[in-house]
Amino acid sequence: MTAVAPPPGDRPVLYVIVCGSPLAGRVDRLVDLAHRDGWQVCVVATPDGAKFVDRAALARLTGHPVRTTYKHPGDPDVLPPADAMVVCPATVNSVNKWTAGITDTLALGLLVEAQGRGTPIVAVPFTNTAMAAHPAFRAGLDRLREWGVTVLFGDDVYPLHAPGTGDRHLDAFPWQLALRALPARPLPTR
Ligand SMILES: Cc1cc2nc3c(=O)[nH]c(=O)nc-3n(C[C@H](O)[C@H](O)[C@H](O)COP(=O)(O)O)c2cc1C
């Protein structure tokens, strides 16, 4: 991770939300690809997602601090408003809470609010076969799709891995699919 952030200019703003999975540690690849596509990128991590990322390196790469917690009332917003969001990796935990409308992390609060505003959202769950089998998770993905969220999940996107083998499946992850699923130049929804 050596690159520095391109100047913001009038580039649309993409929030990349990362949850608690080792794949979060590779999110710089998504940031690089998004920069090449003309996005300005801000990374938001869940508290468990933050354990897997290099916050300082991502801040240099994006030009924005990595946010994890809600700001204090009266504090300024340190990130520009989002034109679109990608949740990748989306954990089973965060998907289940999101579909219930729970906003106990900044990441979930941003997603729930973005849905209400009509901001385009792409969700890319990453988990193993056992966790993915839970009926609440499966039903949640269907609900998100019904609600207009683009969900990239299944063997046609990226084959599920066996429990305990996630680390072996990080290098080949198809980050570019999340970007291809975004609108080319989103309409302002802020
Ligand atoms: C080493 C490790 C790897 C994990 N990998 C995943 C994963 O790939 N997908 C997933 O859904 N949960 C995974 N988990 C479980 C989540 O981190 C856990 O459910 C956590 O509460 C998620 O919080 P969040 O959704 O707020 O990020 C992993 C946990 C650990 C400790």
Image: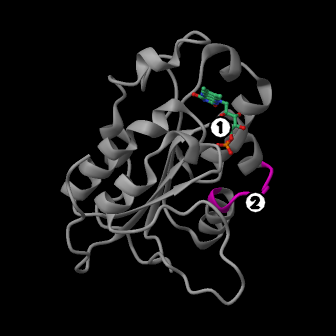
What's the residue type where badge 2 is placed?
Thr
Residue sitting at 62 percent across and 14 percent down?
A: 129
Coloring basis for residues:
one colour
Residue most extreme to the bottom: 74
Neighbour tally class for label 2: few under 14, some 14-19, many 20 plus, Cα within 10 Å: some
Residue sitting at 54 percent across and 82 percent down?
A: 77
> In terms of sequence position, does the residue under pointer 2 or pointer 1 come before the other?
2
What's the residue type where badge 1 is placed?
Leu
Q: Is 15 situated above or below 153?
A: below
Residue sitting at 48 percent across and 61 percent down?
A: 66
Q: Position of residue 26 (x, y in %)?
A: 38, 37
Q: Position of residue 62 (x, y in %)?
A: 33, 62
Q: Quadrant of residue 134?
A: top right
Q: Position of residue 15 (x, y in %)?
A: 45, 61
Query: On the rendered structure, is 45 left or right of 86?
Result: right
Q: Is 138 situated above or below 116?
A: above
Q: Nearer the viewer, residue 169 or 130?
A: 169
Bounds of the magenta span?
100-107
- Residue 103 — which label? 2
Q: Is residue 14 magenta?
A: no
How many numbered marks, from 0 up? 2
Q: Is residue 102 magenta?
A: yes
- Residue 46 — which label? none
Q: Is 125 situated above or below 166?
A: below
**Label 1 SS:** helix
Q: Position of residue 3 (x, y in %)?
A: 20, 54
Q: Which residue is mark 1?
A: 141
Q: Nearer the viewer, residue 143 or 169?
A: 169
**Label 2 SS:** loop
Query: On the rendered structure, is 185 left or right of 117?
Result: left
Query: On the rendered structure, is 28 left or right of 70?
Result: left
